[in-house]
């Protein structure tokens, strides 16, 4: 039988579990329609799920849809259990996103949509609760298109002209087929859904079984059944225990087949499969073999963890949604933590997002979680399974750290008969990018095997920042130099040198403290909007009115978790129960009160012996410790950044452009010099004056004596294409006859101009009205021609380029748009009106003609006389064209 795995996701209270029940009932899988409020839902089997009316753990059910066997995975909707939901996404073929028709697209709905896009899961959308008063189908489809995607299309219309028109707008190939035939083949629609260009929408009420049959038909008619290879593979997404305490490993088989007694393994464990179970609700069927496409649970795997890949499958990346709160677990009197920790590890295997760990320094058990509902679940699990009643102290915020400038960290480890030196380039990354590691070190300097070992040591631990001891993130760490000793270097030496290099670089850097932020949606009576916006401002958040119907208003925005985490209780109080706050984790942003947090935590990086900032050198047969601020006075290899600076300085003094041959491009050198301001370049730098971590944070890194006198800014000319065409009469006249001809004429003029002036030219044309158009950059001869993406004007492109690059380049903007001139002027750019640009080009052409005339006069026998009649005529035509 054909097999497909479909997950069902939603913002809490959108009716996800009710829809699951309706699908199972309509398909004939269950004979009675369960309800969440009656506590008899088929998939909410855990006592606390029945009590609270929410899904906490993902569940599995199997039903038939015509000739397709559907494995339905019901996921948690509450934000506290987002990691459980996200792990399930890794095994889905398709998804059903449930949206409440009464509430529209909510905060967590957008988070789910981003995750579905990240994992590239084709999605059907069921708009639920359409039986409630005030729901409007047309308004909802407009909101879906605006908030989620233009590919959201109502599939209940039938195959009408309007339906085909909307489909055609989503895909170029479909558009061509529709224009040629007036019809769109079903396979093309299926492929567009699979490729996430089209998102079928079905409206109804799961509670009243309205629209459920249409949703099932839509799915059966439009899914493409996955095909699998012969080689075995499986993706683990969950670990649980049954009522007898047997450890169950849940995974989807993604290739080949699996039999009982097969041996499965990863690089760290090997176990035999004792039993294979296929679950549907609480019940399961034991089978001897499963084929690819099956979601099953097996016993016998004692060390498997969620996210691991088996066979041909690679391990998954860590979930994007991560814990942001930390609590201390208080054990009852007489309960030994050393006995309790191994038991808690069982729960952590099932719920890895809990992050239970022992703090040796504080001698306490700590738990990292997403929210307070998880605390209640954890307490219940511990009491039910182990008979121990635990409590928790109020949770703190999990902070992170990053850097704002580029630095070179040096680590050296050379006690007697040991040797390793490592140089790492630490660069700030985009928010939310995490950590990335790579090597740009020459193998002539450090062998490939040693380089791999350094990268392994970078990845094997969570590195602490130097402001608060919090984990570092959003950085790129590159191995740029290193040295080993033929006789004395051992593997552990590079571990010591690598970790010390990270810490030494962080001590020199301009560190930045980050804190988690919520995205929120606040629904409340319109008369209380002023109070809410004032509250959010006091909490260092931002907000704006999304919409209002005269009675109720909706505010959207973001704010720090630390200030907003308990705001729901306050909203309920001052709105007398009429307000609702929905929060989802946005990610980490710069901390709003770093001085207070740094002082409160009181972390001293130089006293953290397990994460030392110093290095060890050897002299006269004995090792000695060198503090971080003197390491570069003792290092054995030349500073990587100093070497780059010297080469650039030398080339600039010689009047030549410096071209990097071995390691990095000139663009990267520009980046390094601009971002570091020579912050830690060898013996010239002021970083050698010892500073505490706090001083490094408060004082900018550009407090150095070396000036930036050799930095030469490259010149860019940005031209607003259509603005210039409309402003130049000859092009305007040509445009009235043929826009393409006018555009090519301007391109040719600017191409000739670039050949004279030699600076870089970017010509920008609007394509923002073209639905689904993606930004396109073409190189025409010697200039860049940009066609902007959908919903982005040429003005916006130019403004963004100016904002992002005005410090790096000398930017000139050519436009006669008054508002745009004001904006780019504010960014420090030079302005040219359309008339001034024309005059500049004419002046450059005139200068070229004069130079050409001189050449003709003095070298007639070498130039004109040597040209054929045809070549002479071409030269004259070129001059006339200019």
Image (cartoon, helix red, strand yellow):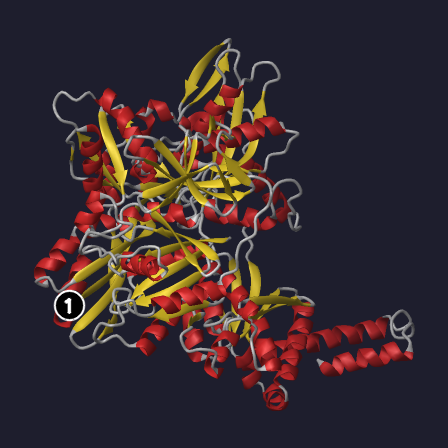
Answer with left or right where residue 40 lies relative to residue 796.
left
In-front residue for pair 696/187: 187
Instruction: Indicate the secondary structure of the residue bearing disc 1.
Output: helix
> Residue at position x 61%, y 84% from top?
739
Answer with left or right where residue 660 lies relative to residue 727.
right
**Number of dots carrying numbers:** 1
- Pick out the residue farthest to the top: 621
Tell me if I can see residue 436 in this picture.
Answer: no
Q: Quadrant of residue 519?
A: bottom left
Q: Which residue is mark 1?
A: 530
Q: Quadrant of the C terminus?
A: bottom right
> Residue at position x 36%, y 56% from top?
8
Tell me if I can see residue 245 in this picture.
Answer: yes
Q: Position of residue 721 (x, y in %)?
A: 56, 77
> Residue at position x 52%, y 56% from top?
225
Q: Quadrant of residue 557?
A: bottom left
Q: Position of residue 800 (x, y in %)?
A: 46, 65
Q: Position of residue 540 (x, y in %)?
A: 22, 55
In-front residue for pair 656/636: 636
Q: In the rendered view, would you say 3 is above or below 747?
A: above
Q: In the rendered view, would you say 706 is above or below 507?
A: below
Q: Residues within 10 Å of mark 1 (few under 14, many from 20)?
A: few
> Residue at position x 54%, y 49% from top?
670
In-front residue for pair 723/717: 723
In-front residue for pair 232/763: 232
Q: Position of residue 12 (x, y in %)?
A: 26, 56
């Amino acid at each position: 039988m054909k097999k497909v795995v479909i997950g069902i996701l939603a913002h809490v209270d959108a009716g996800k579990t009710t829809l699951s029940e309706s699908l199972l009932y309509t398909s004939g899988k269950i004979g009675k329609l369960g309800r969440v409020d009656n506590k008899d839902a088929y998939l909410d089997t855990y006592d606390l799920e029945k009590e609270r009316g929410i899904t906490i753990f993902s569940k599995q059910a199997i039903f038939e849809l015509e000739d397709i066997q559907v494995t339905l995975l019901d996921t948690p909707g509450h934000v506290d259990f987002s990691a459980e939901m996200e792990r399930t996404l890794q095994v889905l073929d398709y998804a059903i996103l449930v949206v409440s028709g009464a509430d529209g697209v909510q905060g967590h709905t957008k988070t789910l949509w981003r995750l579905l896009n990240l994992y590239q899961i084709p999605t059907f959308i069921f708009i639920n609760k359409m039986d409630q008063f005030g729901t409007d189908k047309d308004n909802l489809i407009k909101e879906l298109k605006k908030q989620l995607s233009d590919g959201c299309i109502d599939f209940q219309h039938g195959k009408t002209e309007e339906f085909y028109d909307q489909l055609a707008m989503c895909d170029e190939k479909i558009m061509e087929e529709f224009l040629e035939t007036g019809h769109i083949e079903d396979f093309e629609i299926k492929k567009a859904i699979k490729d996430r260009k089209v998102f079928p929408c079905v409206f109804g009420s799961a509670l009243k079984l309205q629209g459920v049959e249409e949703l099932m038909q839509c799915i059966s008619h439009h899914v493409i059944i996955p095909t699998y290879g012969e080689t075995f593979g499986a993706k683990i997404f969950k670990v649980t225990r049954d009522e007898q305490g047997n450890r169950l490993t849940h995974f989807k088989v993604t290739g080949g087949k699996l039999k009982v007694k097969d041996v499965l393994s990863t690089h760290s464990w090997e176990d035999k499969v004792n039993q294979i179970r296929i679950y549907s609700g609480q019940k399961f069927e034991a089978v001897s073999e499963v084929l690819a496409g099956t979601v099953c649970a097996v016993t016998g795997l004692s060390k498997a963890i969620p996210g691991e890949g088996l066979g041909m499958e690679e391990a998954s990346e860590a979930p994007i949604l991560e814990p942001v709160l930390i609590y201390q677990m208080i054990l009852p009197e007489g309960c030994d933590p050393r006995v309790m920790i191994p038991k808690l590890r069982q729960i952590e295997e099932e719920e890895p997002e809990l992050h239970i760990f022992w703090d040796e320094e504080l001698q306490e058990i700590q738990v990292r979680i997403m929210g307070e509902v998880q605390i209640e679940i954890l307490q219940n699990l511990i009491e039910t399974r182990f008979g121990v009643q635990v409590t928790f102290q109020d949770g703190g915020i999990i902070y992170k750290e990053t850097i704002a400038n580029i630095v070179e960290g040096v680590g050296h480890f050379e006690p007697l008969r040991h040797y390793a030196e490592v140089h790492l380039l630490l660069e700030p990354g985009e928010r939310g990018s995490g950590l990335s590691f790579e090597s740009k070190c020459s193998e002539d300097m450090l062998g490939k095997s040693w380089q791999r070992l350094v990268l392994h040591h970078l990845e094997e631990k969570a590195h602490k920042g130097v402001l608060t001891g919090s984990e570092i993130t959003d950085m790129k760490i590159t191995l740029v130099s290193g040295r080993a000793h033929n006789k004395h270097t051992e593997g552990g030496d590079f571990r010591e040198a690598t970790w010390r290099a990270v810490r030494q670089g962080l001590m020199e850097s301009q560190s930045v403290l980050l804190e988690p932020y919520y995205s929120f949606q606040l629904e409340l009576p319109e008369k209380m909007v002023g109070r809410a916006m004032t509250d959010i401002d006091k909490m260092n958040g931002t907000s704006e009115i999304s919409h209002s119907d005269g009675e109720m208003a909706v505010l959207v925005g973001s704010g720090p978790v630390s200030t907003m985490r308990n705001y729901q209780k306050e909203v309920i109080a001052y709105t007398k129960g009429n307000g609702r706050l929905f929060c989802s984790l946005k990610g980490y942003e710069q901390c709003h009160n770093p001085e207070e947090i740094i002082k409160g935590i009181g972390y001293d990086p130089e006293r953290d012996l397990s994460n030392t900032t110093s290095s060890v050198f050897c002299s006269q047969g004995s090792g000695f410790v060198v503090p971080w601020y003197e390491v570069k006075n003792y290092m054995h290899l030349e500073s990587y950044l100093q070497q780059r600076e010297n080469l650039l300085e030398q080339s600039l003094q010689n009047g030549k452009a410096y071209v990097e041959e071995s390691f990095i491009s000139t663009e990267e050198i520009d980046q390094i010099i601009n971002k570091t301001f020579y912050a830690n370049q060898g013996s010239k730098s002021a970083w050698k004056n010892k500073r505490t971590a706090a001083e490094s944070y408060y004082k900018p890194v550009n407090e150095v004596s070396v000036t930036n006198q050799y930095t030469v800014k490259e010149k860019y000319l940005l031209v607003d294409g259509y603005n210039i065409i409309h402003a130049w009469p000859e092009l305007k006249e040509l445009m009235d006859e043929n826009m393409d001809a006018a555009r090519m004429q301007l391109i040719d003029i600017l191409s000739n101009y670039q050949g004279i002036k030699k600076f870089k030219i970017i010509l920008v044309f609007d394509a923002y009205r073209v639905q689904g158009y993606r930004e396109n950059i073409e190189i025409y001869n010697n200039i860049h021609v940009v066609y902007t993406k959908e919903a982005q004007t040429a003005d916006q492109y130019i403004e963004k380029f100016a904002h992002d690059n005005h410090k790096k380049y000398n930017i000139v903007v050519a436009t006669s748009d008054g508002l745009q001139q004001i904006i780019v002027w504010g960014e420090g750019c030079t302005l040219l009106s359309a008339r001034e640009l024309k005059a500049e080009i004419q002046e450059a052409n005139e200068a070229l003609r004069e130079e050409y005339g001189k050449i003709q006069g003095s070298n007639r026998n070498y130039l004109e006389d040597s040209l054929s009649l045809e070549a002479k005529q071409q030269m004259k035509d070129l001059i006339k064209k200019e």
